Image: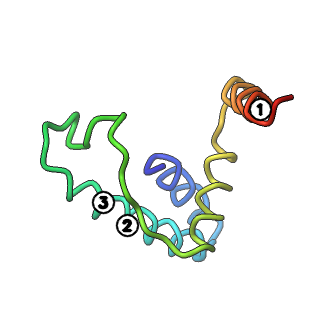
Amino acid sequence: MDACADNTVSVDIEDGNIGALLAGAGVRDAGWRAADAYDGERELGWPPADYPLEVTLRTEHWSWVLAQLERWMSADERRDLTEAIETALGG
Protein backbone atom coordinates (compact mmCIF):
# COMPACT_ATOMS: atom_id res chain seq x y z
CA MET A 1 0.00 0.00 0.00
CA ASP A 2 2.85 2.36 0.74
CA ALA A 3 3.95 2.22 -2.90
CA CYS A 4 0.39 2.87 -4.14
CA ALA A 5 0.03 5.86 -1.81
CA ASP A 6 3.42 7.14 -2.94
CA ASN A 7 2.41 6.80 -6.61
CA THR A 8 -0.89 8.57 -6.00
CA VAL A 9 0.66 11.46 -4.12
CA SER A 10 3.42 11.88 -6.72
CA VAL A 11 0.95 11.96 -9.62
CA ASP A 12 -1.93 13.84 -8.01
CA ILE A 13 0.20 16.58 -6.46
CA GLU A 14 1.17 17.56 -10.01
CA ASP A 15 -2.53 18.21 -10.61
CA GLY A 16 -2.84 20.20 -7.40
CA ASN A 17 -4.87 17.50 -5.63
CA ILE A 18 -4.14 18.42 -2.03
CA GLY A 19 -6.73 15.89 -0.82
CA ALA A 20 -4.62 13.04 -2.21
CA LEU A 21 -1.54 14.47 -0.50
CA LEU A 22 -3.31 14.65 2.86
CA ALA A 23 -4.95 11.23 2.58
CA GLY A 24 -1.75 9.61 1.37
CA ALA A 25 0.34 11.17 4.13
CA GLY A 26 -2.09 9.99 6.79
CA VAL A 27 -2.30 6.45 5.43
CA ARG A 28 1.46 6.15 4.98
CA ASP A 29 2.09 7.48 8.49
CA ALA A 30 -0.30 4.91 9.97
CA GLY A 31 1.49 2.15 8.06
CA TRP A 32 4.91 3.34 9.16
CA ARG A 33 3.78 3.41 12.80
CA ALA A 34 2.41 -0.13 12.46
CA ALA A 35 5.66 -1.30 10.84
CA ASP A 36 7.71 0.31 13.62
CA ALA A 37 5.96 -1.95 16.15
CA TYR A 38 7.54 -5.03 14.50
CA ASP A 39 10.70 -6.08 16.34
CA GLY A 40 11.92 -8.97 14.17
CA GLU A 41 14.27 -9.15 11.23
CA ARG A 42 13.41 -6.74 8.43
CA GLU A 43 13.58 -6.82 4.65
CA LEU A 44 14.79 -3.50 3.21
CA GLY A 45 13.67 -1.81 6.44
CA TRP A 46 10.17 -3.35 6.40
CA PRO A 47 8.71 -6.31 8.25
CA PRO A 48 8.52 -9.46 6.08
CA ALA A 49 5.84 -9.31 3.38
CA ASP A 50 3.82 -12.06 5.07
CA TYR A 51 3.76 -10.26 8.43
CA PRO A 52 0.29 -8.78 8.98
CA LEU A 53 0.47 -5.13 10.01
CA GLU A 54 -2.32 -3.88 12.22
CA VAL A 55 -3.14 -0.51 10.72
CA THR A 56 -5.92 1.61 12.19
CA LEU A 57 -7.59 4.06 9.82
CA ARG A 58 -10.86 5.91 9.58
CA THR A 59 -13.45 4.52 7.16
CA GLU A 60 -12.80 7.22 4.56
CA HIS A 61 -9.09 6.41 4.61
CA TRP A 62 -9.79 2.69 4.06
CA SER A 63 -11.99 3.65 1.11
CA TRP A 64 -9.14 5.77 -0.25
CA VAL A 65 -6.73 2.84 0.21
CA LEU A 66 -8.99 0.48 -1.74
CA ALA A 67 -9.40 3.03 -4.52
CA GLN A 68 -5.63 3.47 -4.82
CA LEU A 69 -4.94 -0.26 -4.83
CA GLU A 70 -7.43 -0.64 -7.66
CA ARG A 71 -6.01 2.39 -9.47
CA TRP A 72 -2.48 0.95 -9.59
CA MET A 73 -3.34 -2.72 -10.23
CA SER A 74 -2.08 -4.33 -13.38
CA ALA A 75 -4.51 -6.12 -15.68
CA ASP A 76 -3.19 -9.47 -14.41
CA GLU A 77 -3.69 -8.42 -10.79
CA ARG A 78 -7.27 -7.35 -11.57
CA ARG A 79 -7.99 -10.70 -13.21
CA ASP A 80 -6.47 -12.62 -10.28
CA LEU A 81 -8.45 -10.57 -7.77
CA THR A 82 -11.69 -11.06 -9.73
CA GLU A 83 -11.09 -14.81 -9.87
CA ALA A 84 -10.32 -14.95 -6.12
CA ILE A 85 -13.50 -13.03 -5.29
CA GLU A 86 -15.60 -15.23 -7.56
CA THR A 87 -14.09 -18.36 -5.99
CA ALA A 88 -14.69 -17.03 -2.48
CA LEU A 89 -18.31 -16.28 -3.36
CA GLY A 90 -18.79 -19.74 -4.83
CA GLY A 91 -19.03 -18.53 -8.41
Figure coloring: rainbow
Tell me the amino acid under the disc marked 3.
Answer: Ala
Q: Which residue is mark 3?
A: 34
For the residues labelled 2 and 1, say whether their Cβ atoms are less than 8 Å apart. Answer: no
The disc placed on residue 30 is 2
Residue placed most toward the observer, 40 or 12: 40
SS category of the residue bearing label 2: helix
Q: Residue furthest front?
A: 90
Residue 8, position in %: x, y? 57, 55
Lower position in the chain sequence, tag 3 or tag 1: 3
45 lies left or right of 26: left
32 lies left or right of 75: left
Q: Quadrant of residue 61?
A: bottom right
Tell me the amino acid under the disc marked 2.
Answer: Ala
Q: Is residue 84 above or below residue 42?
A: above
Query: Residue drawn at (58%, 58%), measured in percent from left and top?
Result: 65
Q: Quadrant of residue 37?
A: bottom left
Residue placed most toward the observer, 20 or 58: 58
Q: Which residue is mark 1?
A: 82
For the residues labelled 3 and 2, say whether their Cβ atoms are less than 8 Å apart. Answer: yes
SS category of the residue bearing label 1: helix
Q: CA distance from mark 3 to mark 2?
A: 6 Å
Q: Residues within 10 Å of mark 3 (few under 14, many from 20)?
A: some
53 lies left or right of 89: left
For the residues labelled 3 and 1, say whether their Cβ atoms are less than 8 Å apart. Answer: no
Tell me the amino acid under the disc marked 1.
Answer: Thr
Q: Residues within 10 Å of mark 1 (few under 14, many from 20)?
A: few
SS category of the residue bearing label 3: helix
